[in-house]
Amino acid sequence: MKIRPQYVKQSNPLQLSVIQFTDTHIHSGSKTLLHGIDSSETLKSIVRHINELETPDVILLTGDLVEIPDEESYLKLRAILTELKAPVFCLPGNHDCPALMYRLMNYENIKTDKLIRGEDWQLILLNSMMPGEMYGYLDKAETVFLEKAIQDFNDGYSLVALHHHPVKVNSPWMDTMVLENADNFFQILESGHNVKIVICGHIHNELELCINDILILGTPSTNVQYILDSQQPGYNTKLPAYRKITLGASGLIDSNITWIG
Ligand SMILES: [Fe+2]
């Protein structure tokens, strides 16, 4: 599989500035509330905040773009994201329909490219959704693509983005929906020595840990956050959020979460 990289302009040649949104869960029709929160309104407030205060080179949207994958929901999301000044690259989560996403989410500044390159860093976007399943899995095409993308960029550093969490988060219910073939995933990551960071969505929560020198970051949703340590799915009243990641020319990474009140 030959996938051409999409090149992005860096405002500062010494760093690639990335913002991650995740689990936007946009609703169509009259039902707009997701567990009591209007997911379109919280995303709009984040978009306004970013346009006023941030200057990202790239924005990544890491899955669960919509609550129910219909055309109206994707078009509603698209209308909100076109307000952003930076390119927005999307990958699918378990709530998405990849075919519909690829058809509708290539519009103006919104794209679905799987390989993005700056000066010293590349961003690899994976599809971990299995049709009809809540858990994640990387099929053969995705693992071959990942392996090749890492090999082809040995002189630089790589960030890998996917929807599902590749490590368990000590949650009785969320960990039934983990990336099933995580062992294979980490084997591939560790084969190239240039993968520095993995980012995911899905857990609607913060996660930060390091495995064999690879930083693993999970990011809260742009709307509802989960209670992970309960026996059953639970939701809390934490604020919507996004993550900022600065990827330095020497491989250094800086990251923080902004909560939007
Ligand atoms: Fe989600």
Image (tube, helix red, strand yellow):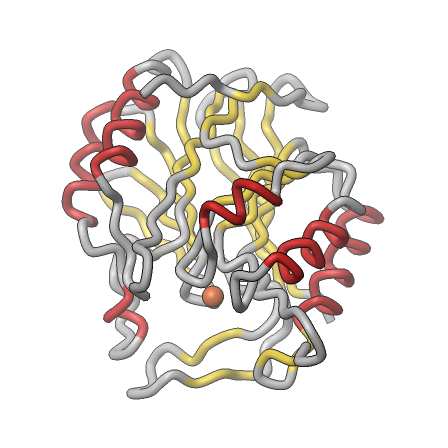
Apparent side of residue 192 relative to residue 224 in the rendered image (left or right): left
Q: What residue is rendered at 31% in x and 39% in y?
A: 214
Residue 42 falls in which quadrant of the image? bottom right
Q: What is the x, y in percent for residue 55?
A: 75, 37
| Near-viewer residue (29 or 192) | 29
Q: What residue is rendered at 33% in x and 14% in y?
A: 152
Question: Please, is residue 145 above or below residue 233 in the view?
Answer: above
Apparent side of residue 246 relative to residue 161 in the rendered image (left or right): right
Q: What is the x, y in percent for residue 240?
A: 63, 68
> Quick one: quadrant of the C terminus?
bottom right
Q: What residue is rendered at 32% in x and 66% in y?
A: 134
Callout count: 0
| Near-viewer residue (58 or 213) | 58
Apparent side of residue 76 relative to residue 166 in the rendered image (left or right): right
| Near-viewer residue (225 or 31) | 31
Q: What is the x, y in percent for residue 198?
A: 38, 43
Question: Please, is residue 46 above or below residue 190 in the view?
Answer: below
Q: What is the x, y in percent for residue 53?
A: 80, 47
> Quick one: quadrant of the N terminus?
top left
Apparent side of residue 189 relative to residue 75 in the rendered image (left or right): left
Residue 245 falls in which quadrant of the image? top right
Q: What residue is rendered at 76% in x and 61% in y?
A: 44
Q: Residue furthest right?
A: 52
